[in-house]
Amino acid sequence: MSERAPDPAASGRAYLLLTLTSLCWGANAVFGRLAVGEVSPMALVTLRWLAALGLLVVFARGHVRRDWPAIRPHLGFVSAMGALGFTAFNALYYVAAHSTTAVNLGIIQGAGPVFVLLGALAVYRIPATRLQVAGVLVTLVGVAIVACGGDLEQLASLRLNPGDLLMMAACGLYAGYTLALRRRPPASALGLFTVMAGAAFLSSLPLALIEAALGAFQWPTAKGWLILAMVALLPSFLAQICFIQGVALIGPSRAGVFINLVPVFASILALLVLAEPFALYHATALALVLGGIWLAERGNPR
């Protein structure tokens, strides 16, 4: 089963959709920093999917009704995608952020395309070409430069801790979700995403209850509600629909490479929103990430 080879117009649409996805996910990193002290992690996970589900009920009711005959036979599979790819990923990410460094998180998150390529080989027998491997490695160098703040000497002192292992597990889950999209039922992106968002919300409730039992649950403040609205609209709603469509157009292996744009966009948005400095190494990393994506695309077997 080989990776699909869409026409140039489809590829162009996919590039736009996946770049927009990465931009929204980069914004999520800024939202996550702004949310500290304004809303607890599991409250944010649960409420973001509740809000996204509310948007989908308004905009996607017709899609769900039309797609339900196609989705219903695969309801367990689709629900698992939502629970693991949405809820579990976000939960592991937020917990990991409390027990590891930003350098480690950035590098490990940037390894997502590696998980996708390995999974595509193991599950679908899609071999990675030399240029695809080279492209992923180049993008990882760019991600590493961003993650270590331009000081590559920091990489030598990296040590794995429980947070690192949790983040690796989170990347593995999202890679699995990305690969599973290849077997999505024949439904529209809105219809499919609505069902997955419902599963994400339901599966997040036990996590919120556990957080409450531990005395760590915090309802959003006034600022927290604003952050929640942005999280629900951009990374939880718009980005996921764009990602589903992008994977449908060019396949999981090629789409996965675009995840490496996330830390670059996060750095740029941190400059604009949080007034964090933008240095030469950010520009260097951006060039490497874009160059890696270009290499991976050149290496895609047509």
Image (cartoon, rainbow, N blue to C red):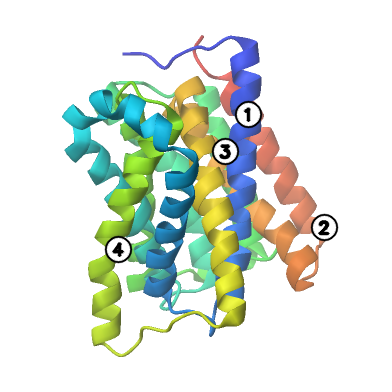
- Residue 3: x and y in percent read 41, 17
Q: Which residue is mark 3?
A: 258
Q: Residue 183: image x %, image y %?
A: 29, 26
Q: Residue at x 54, y 36 (%)?
A: 242
Q: CA distance from mark 2 to mark 4?
A: 40 Å
Q: Are marks 3 and 2 in contact (CB under 8 Å)?
A: no
Amino acid carrying label 4: it is Ser
Relative height, residue 7 to residue 275 (above, below): above
Q: CA distance from mark 4 to mark 1?
A: 31 Å
The label number, if any, that marks residue 260 in the structure image: none
Q: Earlier in the sequence, mark 3 or mark 1?
A: 1
Q: Nearer the viewer, mark 4 or mark 3?
A: 4
Using the image, determine if residue 154 lies above or below residue 239: below
The three-letter code of the residue at mark 3 reads: Phe
| Mark 3 residue element | helix
Answer with the quarter of the image where residue 77 lies.
top left
Can you identify the residue that label 1 sits on? 15
Q: Residue at x 30, y 80 (%)?
A: 211
Q: Nearest the camera: 222 or 39?
A: 222
Which residue reaches farthest bottom? Answer: 215
Residue 260 x/y as whole percent:
57, 45
Along the polypeptide, which appears first: circle 4 or circle 3? 4
Is 124 positioned to the left or the right of 164 in the image? left
What residue appears at the point 45 percent right and 37 percent down from the top-left corner?
A: 60
Q: Residues within 10 Å of mark 3 (few under 14, many from 20)?
A: many
* Residue annotated with mark 2: 280
Upstream in sequence: badge 4 or badge 1: 1
Vertical placement of 192 versus 298: above or below? Answer: below
The answer to whether the residue labelled 3 contacts the one labelled 1, judged by CB atoms less than 8 Å apart, is yes
Q: Quadrant of the N terminus?
A: top left
